[in-house]
Image (cartoon, coloured by chain):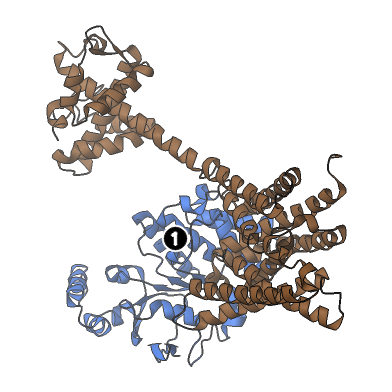
Chain colours: A brown, B blue
Amino acid sequence: MNWLDYNTRVVLAGTVLLGVSSGVVGTYMLLRKRALVGDVASHAALPGIGLAYLIMEQSHPGTGKWLPGLLLGAALSASAGLLVSHGLRQIRRIKEDAALGITLSLFFGVGVALLTLIQALPTGQSAGLNDFIFGKAASMVASDVVGLAITACVVIVVCAVVHKELALICFDAEYAAAGGWSVGGVDLLLTALVIVVTVLGMQSVGLLLVVALLVLPPTSARFWTDRLGTMVWTSALLGGVASAAGVLLSAGVPKLAAGATIVLMGTAGFAVSVLFGRRRGLYWHWRAESETRQRVGLDDLLRAVYEVIEPKLSSAAADLTAGSVSLPELVSSRRWSTFRVRGLLQLAQSRGLMRRDAQDRFHLTATGRREAQRAVRNHRLWELYLIHYAAVAPTHVDRSADAIEHVLQPEIVDELEELLRDSSRTPAMPQSPHSAREAGGM
Amino acid sequence: MTVAYHRRPVLWNIDYDAPAARLVAIVGPNGAGKSTLIKAVLNLIPRASGEVRFFGEPYRQMRQRVAYVPQRTSVDWDFPVTAQDVVVMGLYGRLGWFRPVTRSARRAALESLERVGLADFAHRQISQLSGGQQQRVFLARALVQQADLYLMDEPLAGVDAATERTIVNLLQDLRQRGKTALVVHHDLQTVTEYFDEVLLLNTRVIAAGPVEAIFTVENLKRTYGGKLALLDQVGHQMTLTGRSP
């Protein structure tokens, strides 16, 4: 790490702790369905910064930039903002999103107005209050980071202590209330934690972007786990990594703001999680779906081939691989498009289930024969089962069987076979209750 | 007691004393205030007037002896917890503030899941359970509390036959052990079969008492008003089961 200068290392440490603590707090906030509270808190903090600067400058000229004072002002103003939005929500015609939107813009507007006034003051130019809007991680000094680190650690410890209570309220607040838990108290604590993290993040990420640190890591973490505990620390990890990567990237490229790079890194982590997260990533979902589609399609194709070849054979004992089908035969036996049949035939050939001869006719391979027999057997067992047990009208059988046979487990098939041995004419391979032509014409 | 939303009473002059060791069905049309009654009793909704006592004491002191089974649709089942995690929540009250979940609490939750036939599903995320299984998880969360009084909001709504059987058996088991259950119930046809007592509710108590005496077509007409088609069905059902309507 000797290629990093001292200041970058300080900024790195502070920002990573911020990322970790916001990842933790953000998880509960998200699960309590209060994701936007962080956004309102950060925007509502701006007038507090302006007012704190003015008050400090007024009482002791030159002390206006004292960071703890500014952050305290920010926290108070953010709390006031949340109180206002809470108050607005008590009015019946105002919904939650409207209440949050009104408060957010009102406080931010007042804040911007105050900052413009401060800019006009003789000392205002150099105050650098605008840095709180977009963040300026590089301006952090060691003493700031120590305070930030301690606060972030306190936030993490508090969350660990009340994890059980937060989880209960997030999952089922009504049940919690019936059990005597103070839902309001826990909510208040959570809101306070959100405000603290927001205010801490303003300096490095900026108030416009700090909500990303609260929302992106937990949303990403949800794609990796189904357990709340795991989600909390995954979110913390993602928040920390995004912050570290963002600071390093910004240190490597001159003039690139750390706030933006941190948020972009967080978004990159989010994109990867949505696509590849083990629990519900879109890629896995898509892959499972396409596998099912292929399996179902192949079963359908093999059954169609079987049913076209079967009547042509001289006896039931004749070898299925000796028979062949053409593309038009298959197309007319089922109501499929030529395009679909071609695709399925290609797939069957690539899997070694079928082969094409010089006359452009298709044959089952030995593997294909085995698979076709399995599919047909499954299908006919189900058809019989439905006819005998489920009182399904015979004309509807083929259609319902089409969907249902693919969920059959081998053990159930065996059980069905046992069950239907008496009723079927040829136990090893029961006849289809209706002919192949009839089935295809449905 | 009386409960009001925005000055319009939803429940009016409710005076009811639940008998011990009995299964009580709370029956009434939509909007009669069945869920509201349970929530008001549990202090979840402020009461305009009146008082509720549990075993002679206010609810505040009797919380551990009362278990609540909310409607299944009242929570987000996508929440990242397993069935066992949800059932453990029934023991949070006993654990108290800031205490982490103990191993014995997790074991008790597992036993409770076993009672509702879900031992094999304990480690499943709750969205991967069927509606009936989710309802049983809620029931297991109430059972693990080992309460004496159970307040259940529509536990039999939209569940499969296996779940209905399990829940009814559990209710009867509770009664045998001297526990009381107040159950909001929507299916008039099964009231006589499953319950001992019935509370007919439509903003006020229409009638309450043993099913044989109270669950009559006359009383149901007063509860449901003009919905006669439904009542005819019930009357028919009751004739079939050999009881005079």
Q: Which amino acid does label 1 sit on?
A: Gln
Above or below, comparing residue B180 to residue B99 in the picture? below
- Residue B43 appearing in the image: no
A151 relative to B168 in the view: left or right? right
- What residue is disc 1 on? B135
Residue at 86% from the left image edge and 75% from the top image edge? A62
Front residue of this view, candidates B224 and A271: A271
Q: How many marks?
A: 1
B198 relative to B136 in the view: left or right? left
Q: Where is residue A277 in the image (x, y as percent from the top left)?
A: 55, 43
Front residue of this view, candidates A180 and A307: A307
Residue at 78% from the left image edge and 50% from the top image edge? A12
Residue at 53% from the left image edge and 86% from the top image edge? B53
Pick out the residue farthest to the top. A358
**What element does badge 1 sit on?**
helix
**Quarter that holds the C terminus of chain B:** bottom left
Quadrant in the rendering for residue B235: bottom left
Residue at 54% from the left image edge and 40% from the top image edge? A276
Front residue of this view, candidates B40 and B168: B40
**Quarter that holds the N terminus of chain B:** bottom left
Q: Position of residue A51 (x, y in %)?
A: 73, 78
